Image (cartoon, rainbow, N blue to C red):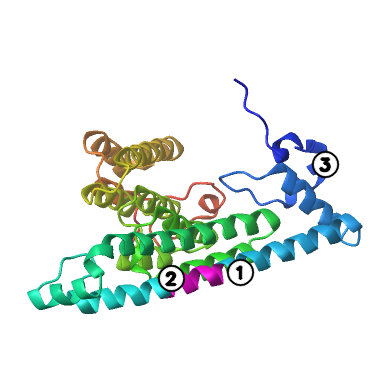
């Protein structure tokens, strides 16, 4: 049975409607809505047109709607937090455990905590789940409406991550982690951001955290650290395990290809790296990858400075 197309899918514009603007659109991993992209590009080309003004009004209304829904969600979260503190006080400091003493049990029963405890915990979890979902929707919408630069998207992501970072209920939420990883993609040097996630154990149970961090380390030629990080993710049982194994295997293949390309480029002059390539074939581990780091302050000849690949052998 054929699926009925949505209104947006049925009205997908022709590529020619925004072809001339494609150089000004930031690529995103999840792709973009062609209909939204065509409308936004129309606004940028003719900001004084009636269509553009209507779109601007719609965008302002949608932003105000998100802000109002977030304010309401935060109010619900505050109430849920107060209820949790009340449960903790009655049950002896643990909202997820049974009362520790008979007196505490009697107090909890008198307050109706025992009967409704599970429901209250589930309600609190649902409140924070809804809050994270709102921030994700807001960030996706803002990225669609401002395809040319990341300023507005970055503002929303920074607000979202800062507000959720101190909420223990959101610590292992995959969508919360996704907000952080999107923000990391907008940073030229995201090492400090990943360190913050590591220290606060945000997303530590998800393979995407280790995989994305390892990718950034790889771009800095910190291969040993990238492999070690993936191994830590595997040791800590981050899921899905298959994703980490695939990332680790791909990284090892790219490192080995790098060695082989370098060996072909420099020929017999890189004797030490030829030996390293043999060691790598026998033991493709993080220890072996350390030798691939580019030495700092190597003195280059004029001819070497013109080459694409820099010499990797240490020099005195």
Q: CA distance from mark 1 to mark 2?
A: 15 Å
Kind of element beneath mark 1: helix
Q: Is residue 314 magenta?
A: no
Residue at figure coordinates x 34%, y 55% from the top left: 314
Q: Quadrant of residue 138?
A: bottom right
Q: Which mark is residue 283?
A: none
Picture coordinates of residue 159, whole percent (x, y)? 53, 70
Q: Is residue 207 above or below residue 281?
A: below
Q: Which mark is residue 77?
A: 2
Q: Is residue 23 left or right of residue 128?
A: right
Residue at figure coordinates x 29%, y 78% from the top left: 86
User: Foreground: 44 or 106?
Assistant: 106
Task: Name the front one of labels 1 and 2.
Answer: 2
Callout 1 environment at 10 Å: few (<14), some (14 to 19), or many (20+)? some
Range of residues picked out in magenta: 70-78
Picture coordinates of residue 271, whole percent (x, y)? 31, 41
Picture coordinates of residue 183, whole percent (x, y)? 51, 61
Circle 3 is placed at which residue position? 17
Picture quarter with the C terminus: bottom left
Q: Which one is earlier in the sequence, the residue at label 3 or at label 1? A: 3
Circle 1 is placed at which residue position? 67
Kind of element beneath mark 2: helix
């Amino acid at each position: 049975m054929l699926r009925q197309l949505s209104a947006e899918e049925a009205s997908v514009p022709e590529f020619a409607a925004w072809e001339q603007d494609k150089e000004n659109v930031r690529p995103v991993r999840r792709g973009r809505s062609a209909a939204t992209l065509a409308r936004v590009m129309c606004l940028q080309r003719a900001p004084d047109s009636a269509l553009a003004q209507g779109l601007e009004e719609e965008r302002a209304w949608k932003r105000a709607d998100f802000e109002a829904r977030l304010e309401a969600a935060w109010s619900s979260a505050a109430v849920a937090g107060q209820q949790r503190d009340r449960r903790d006080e009655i049950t002896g400091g643990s909202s997820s455990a049974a009362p520790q003493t008979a007196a505490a049990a009697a107090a909890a029963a008198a307050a109706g905590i025992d009967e409704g405890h599970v429901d209250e915990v589930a309600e609190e979890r649902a409140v924070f789940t809804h809050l994270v979902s709102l921030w994700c929707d807001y960030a996706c919408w803002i990225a669609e409406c401002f395809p040319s630069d990341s300023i507005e998207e970055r503002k929303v992501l920074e607000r979202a991550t800062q507000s959720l970072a101190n909420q223990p209920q959101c610590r292992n939420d995959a969508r919360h982690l996704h907000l952080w990883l999107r923000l990391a993609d907008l940073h030229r040097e995201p090492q400090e951001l990943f360190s913050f996630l590591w220290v606060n154990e945000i997303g530590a149970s998800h393979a995407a955290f280790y995989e994305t961090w390892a990718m950034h380390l790889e771009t800095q030629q910190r291969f040993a650290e990238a492999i070690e990080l993936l191994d830590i993710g595997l040791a800590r049982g981050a899921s899905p395990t298959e994703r980490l194994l695939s990332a680790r295997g791909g990284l090892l293949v790219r490192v080995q290809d790098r060695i082989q390309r370098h060996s072909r480029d420099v020929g017999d002059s890189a004797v030490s790296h030829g030996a390293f390539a043999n060691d790598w074939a026998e033991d493709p581990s993080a220890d072996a990858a350390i030798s691939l780091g580019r030495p700092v302050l190597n003195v280059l000849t004029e001819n070497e400075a013109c080459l694409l690949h820099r010499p990797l052998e240490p020099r005195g």
